Image: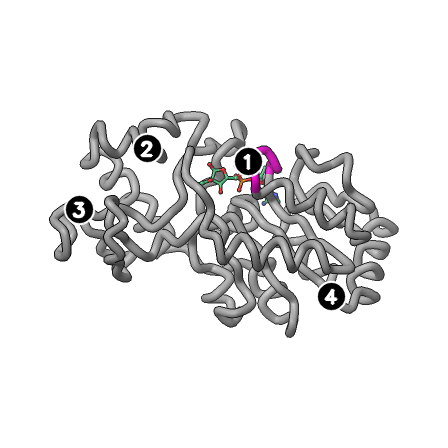
Amino acid sequence: MNPELLKRGGEILSAAARKVSFSGAGLSAESGVATFRDAKSGGLWTKDDPMRLASPEGFADDPNLVMDWYAARRRSVAEAEPNPAHRALASQTGMIHVTQNVEDLLHRAGACGEQVIQLHGSIARDHCHARCGFEEAIDLANPPTLRDCPNCGQPLRPGVVWFGESLPPEAWQRAEDACAECDALLVIGTSAEVYPAAGLIGLAKSGGARIIIVNTEPSGASHLADVELIGKAGEIVPELFL
Ligand code: OAD
């Protein structure tokens, strides 16, 4: 790690009145939660077809397959612990954390609910696939199999955003506002390939924010970086807040 770049990143963050983080699966990789597109570390979408496992069409086609796949992911999240990057972020009072991650590791590291905006929903909840309004918290360690909605009899499914679905409007609005108004955006562990979420980085940049990127390799947002730090989130992020 280039110490000069690390120092510059830290200075940008400490000078910023409004700080926002924007994270992806790489933030939780060192906690043992799989990423999606990393060929090197066996990213989920390098082995499994996202359209079968994470789309409304895939669920309609084989709901048991989808629920069983999510049950395995849920168990792996239940076993995971927050890493030093989660803890460093959670300790920053007033910082907003916009995340594409559906797990709760930032919350478990101590971030308060208001501070965390989950753009792609939560793996810790199920909701009615027919959107009758029913939803419930599930036990990640003992995840449910396929079952019917007690309100309307349609199947229940994980409360995450799938390919082809819209992001939760309130979360999206809050994320847009936070990114448009921030002075520094710390982008951590995302390939920045999935839109509209990845568009928040350009939004922050065009609003005048300085962009710091932490990733084990260059990403789709590298061209927007004021400071790009190549390395592991769990090692670099805590250093940025010293
Ligand atoms: P990706 O798997 O696309 O990207 C993960 C990024 O993290 C890659 O750029 C890696 O280089 C980087 N990375 C891996 N380990 C790291 C580490 N220890 N420290 C820092 N960086 C590391 O995951 P996302 O960008 O989160 O959507 O993917 C975006 C969305 O695509 C996900 O939210 C999910 C997926 O389909 C939905 O589920 C709707």
Which segment did they paint magenta? Answer: 191-196
How far is disc 4 from disc 2 in space, using C-alphas?
37 Å
The residue under label 4 is which amino acid type?
Answer: Arg
Horizontal relation, residue 203 to residue 163: left or right: right
Is label 1 in a helix, a strand or a loop?
Answer: loop
How far is disc 4 from disc 3 in space, using C-alphas?
42 Å
Dot 3 corresponds to which residue? 145
Judge whether 133 appears above or below 109 on screen.
above
Marks 4,1: beta carbons within 8 A: no
The residue under label 3 is which amino acid type?
Answer: Thr
Image mark for residue 53: 2
Is label 3 in a helix, a strand or a loop?
Answer: loop
Is label 4 in a helix, a strand or a loop?
Answer: loop
User: What percent of the width, then of the height, locates residue 7?
Assistant: 84, 57
Judge whether 173 appears above or below 88 on screen.
above
| Principal secondary structure, stretch drawn in magenta | loop
Badge nearest the viewer, 2 or 1: 1
How far is disc 2 from disc 1 in space, using C-alphas?
16 Å
Dot 1 corresponds to which residue? 194
Badge nearest the viewer, 4 or 3: 4
Dot 4 corresponds to which residue? 18
On whether ligand 1 comes within 8 Å of the CB at mark 1, the answer is yes
Dot 2 alpha-carbon crowd within 10 angstroms: few under 14, some 14 to 19, many 20 or more: many
